[in-house]
């Protein structure tokens, strides 16, 4: 594992697909820019605020564990 690879991955694309929701719709409902959500969706985020995670979970009706996953060997 490279030093910058933390092993935590965001499953936002999968959850969006399950909900039949677009990134644009999610952005409007959560109040987070499409650019920032795209960074999360494409697994380029280095951090996420708990307030953002909570808002995503509320809108997507899911738990943090539905959005985040850990893989020791990416």
Image (tube, helix red, strand yellow):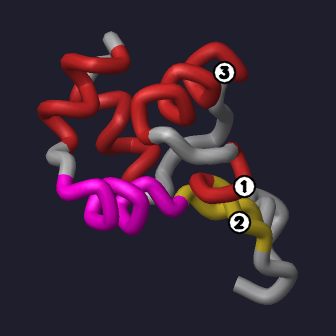
* Residue 33 vs residue 55, the one in the foreground: 55
Q: Horizontal and vertical percent for residue 33?
A: 27, 20
For residue 22, side relative to residue 2 (left or right)? left
Q: Does residue 49 appear in the picture of this structure? A: yes
Q: Is mark 1 in CB contact (under 8 Å) with mark 2?
A: yes
Q: Which residue is mark 1?
A: 65
User: In the figure, 68 relative to 58: above or below?
Assistant: below
Q: Horizontal and vertical percent for residue 68?
A: 66, 56
Q: Residue 73 got which mark?
A: none
- Numbered disc 1: secondary structure: helix
Q: Does residue 5 appear in the picture of this structure? A: no
Identify the residue at image location x=67%, y=34%: 47
Q: CA distance from mark 2 to mark 3?
A: 16 Å
Task: Determine if the magenta segment contains residue 12.
Answer: yes
Q: Which residue is mark 2?
A: 69
- Numbered disc 3: secondary structure: loop
Q: CA distance from mark 1 to mark 3?
A: 15 Å
Q: Which residues are magenta?
A: 11-20
Q: Which image quadrant is residue 50 in?
A: top right
Q: CA distance from mark 1 to mark 2?
A: 7 Å
For residue 21, side relative to residue 12 (left or right)? left
Identify the residue at image location x=80%, y=88%: 73
Q: Horizontal and vertical percent for residue 20?
A: 19, 57
Task: Determine if the magenta segment contains residue 73.
Answer: no
Going by the picture, which residue comes out furthest to the front?
61
Q: Which is nearer the N-term, disc 1 or disc 3?
A: 3
Q: Which residue is mark 3?
A: 49
Sort mark 3 into few (<14), some (14-19) or many (20+) by Cα contacts within 10 Å: few
- Numbered disc 2: secondary structure: strand
């Amino acid at each position: 594992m490279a030093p910058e690879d933390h092993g935590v991955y965001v499953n936002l694309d999968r959850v969006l697909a399950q909900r039949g929701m677009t990134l644009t719709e999610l952005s409007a409902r959560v109040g987070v820019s499409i650019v920032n959500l795209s960074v999360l969706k494409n697994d380029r985020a280095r951090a996420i605020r708990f307030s953002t995670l909570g808002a995503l979970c509320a809108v997507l009706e899911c738990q943090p564990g539905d959005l985040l996953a850990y893989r020791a060997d990416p």
